[in-house]
Each structure stands twice: as structure tokens, then as C-alpha cells.
Image (spheres, rainbow, N blue to C red):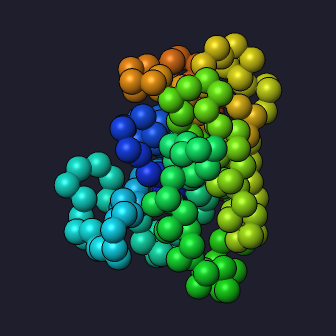
Amino acid sequence: MHNILVLYYSRHGHVAQMAQKIARGIEEVQDCEAVVRTVPAVSTVCEATAADIPEQGAPYVTQEDLKNCAGLILGSPTHFGNMAAPMKYFLDQTSGLWLGGQLVGKPAAVFTSTSSQHGGQESTLLSMMLPLFHHGMLVLGLPYTEPSLSDTTMGGTPYGASHVAGSQQQNPLTDDEVNLCRALGKRVAFTAVKLA
């Protein structure tokens, strides 16, 4: 069985919903299983630790989850055109995996959600790709052979799946956004199987 790690941070729930759709796409590929994990919030006043198990949602990720995955899909809301601080904070702690080359050659992809149509989706997706490149991962996007990429009027980019949540977080995932999430999960899972 190939474990594909879907690692996300979600503040209002939209990125978490996308993670579940991506996981569904992963599990449509034979011999693949989605492992959904999150990262804890970062304290704004001091170094603080979170409980070992979150009150709700996916379990917190460990370095072992990364080490043992056959592929990785990262998700974060957009904060001023960049990934959220909790995701960056976690990634900054993976130098041990980098030194050991633990992620080299594994497929990876990224996804995000913004409040507005032009809220920095693509720059956020690119910012999440940078540590993946440094880890030697094979970064995948969404090809235009996915019909929803051309049909969408909300989220969706060739750099990865995306969603436009709205200024009040009022927008549910559209059918096109769901299709692109599932396609991204399938693409990474299929690639992991081929590489194995």
C-alpha cells in the first residue's frame, strides 16, 4: 500500500474540506491510501506547545509521517500571498529529513484557499513548492487536460488546486474546485505507484 500524505493547515475549514476531496481522489487509485494530517497553530506571543491530539479534525503530523509517505500534498490558506505561518513553521523543522534525503524522488503537489479571486493563490502555491524542491521532490501541477481547469470561474490553477472562499468565508467548494482537488490527489497517487 502506498501512503500519500495530505498535510494541511486550515483556519476556517475550507482547506480542510479540500484535503478531504484530495484524499478521496488518492483512494480512487488502486493500492493507495490517503493519510490526512494537519499542523498546530503557532502562538503569537511565545513558544507554546499544542496538545498531542487536536480537539477536532485530522491528527497532527509527525516527521515519521513525512519520512514514510510515498507522496505528499501540502495545503494552506493564503496569507498575504504566502503560506500560513503554521505550515512554514512545520516545514522549517524538516532539515533532518533534508539532510538524510528522505523525501528525494517522491511526488508532491500543493493546494490553497483565498478569500478573494485575486488573493494570491498562485504565489502561495509557488511558495509551498520551494521547500519541496529543496527536499528533492518531484512537484506536480494540474494539466489543462483536466476539463475543470478551463471551465472554472472560481478556483483552480495549473500550479495546484485552489478555492475562492469569499470575504465572509461563505462560498462552498464548486463542482470544478472539487473535481480539481480529486484530480490532484489521483495524479500524485498514480505517480507514486508508477515510481514504485
In the rendered image, the residue lying farthest to the front is 45
Q: Residue at x 57, y 73 (%)?
A: 92
- The residue depicted at 65 percent of the width and 16 percent of the height is 152
User: At which x and y percent is residue 167?
Assistant: 45, 24
Q: Residue at x 54, y 33 (%)?
A: 114
Q: Residue furthest right?
A: 144
Quick check: can you spot residue 90? Answer: yes
Quadrant including the C terminus: bottom right
User: Is residue 184 visible from the viewing direction of this image?
Assistant: no
The image position of residue 151, as x and y in percent, is 69, 13
164 or 79: nearer the eye? 79
Q: Is residue 129 above or below residue 45?
A: above
Q: Residue 109: horizontal and vertical position, in percent?
A: 66, 49
Q: Quadrant of residue 139?
A: bottom right
Residue 18 or residue 117, whichever sits in front: 117
Question: Residue farthest to the left?
Answer: 55
Q: Quadrant of residue 170?
A: top left
* Residue at point 36%, 63% (across, down): 44
Seen in the image, is 169 located left or right of residue 103?
Answer: left
Give the image location of residue 67, x and y in percent.
55, 74
Q: Nearer the viewer, residue 189 or 11?
A: 11
Given residues 139 and 168, the one toward you in this image is: 168
Left or right of 112 on screen, residue 42: left
